[in-house]
Image (tube, grey):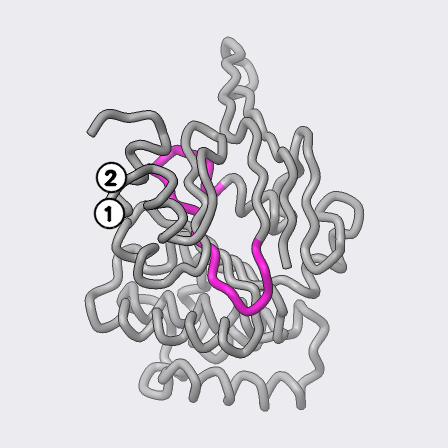
Amino acid sequence: MIHADHLSKTFVGVPGQPKRKVVAVESVSFKAEDGRITGLLGPNGAGKSTTLRMLATLIRPDSGKASIDGYSVTNDVLSVRQHLGFMPHNAGIYPRLTSRENIEYYARLCGMNKKTTKVRVDELIDMLDMGKFADRRSAGFSQGQKTKVALARALVHRPQTILLDEPTNGLDVMATRSLREIIRKLASDGHCIVFSSHIMQEVAALCDEIAIISSGNISMTGALDTLLENTGQQSLEDAFVVAIGGEL
């Protein structure tokens, strides 16, 4: 479970140049529950990735607080990381390593022993249908293959809570469908899933809860039906425009 309460983050310009402050996240509050899929929906630059990076303990919020499964993202960093799987927007897999080696490397970083690692890696390769490229070097992989490796890496230590930053970006139709089913299965197994997206259809198809983020603030939260009712609209796209104060 995730609780975020008035998270904020401001970045300052490059050292040696005139200082220019950029407010990436002004005040973000939302809750994500176990066994449900929560979507952060917003345009590019809205603060989605920065919010996820704060929750993942990669950057420290300037103010506000958040917890992952009861552990503070600022005071219990190691505990948060033990309970959390994070797949960043850019997969960031090592091109000189095979798929299997990428996953094994991360497992060892998480403190897993060799025996447990081998069993878990084999399990993930089977679950994500990675057998055909499990022992190929990652250089030259398609976006779908990179995404599967990154997802396996995020799941290898069996985290309860999973953050996915625009996971379907660059995927073809079949790869997107496959990933959707994996996300649904994880939620049905009781995991807390949060993913960011700017794609309306993606969010409408997957999410139990939606948090609309715009200019670093949460504009509206709720299930799809709730958002439509509160905005008086018939589609998520129109509800989104109304929620962020735009004109239809």
* SS for callout 1: loop
Residue 118 percent coordinates (x, y): 59, 88
- Quadrant position of residue 54: top right
User: Residue at 31% across / 75% down in the picture?
Assistant: 178
Residue type for callout 2 = Asp
Residue closer to the observer: 124 or 31: 31
Disc 2 marks which residue? 238
Specify the label residue 235 is tagged with: 1
- For the question of whether residue 206 can be seen, the reply is yes
Q: Nearer the viewer, residue 178 or 58?
A: 178
Separation of residues labelled 2 and 1 (CA atoms): 5 Å
Q: Dot 2, how many residues are within 10 Å of its Cα: few (below 14), some (14-19), or many (20+)?
A: some
Task: Give left or right: position of 94 versus 238.
Answer: right
Quadrant of the snapshot with the C terminus = top left
Q: Please state if 162 lies on the left or on the right of 109 as rendered.
A: left
Q: Which residues are magenta?
A: 32-49
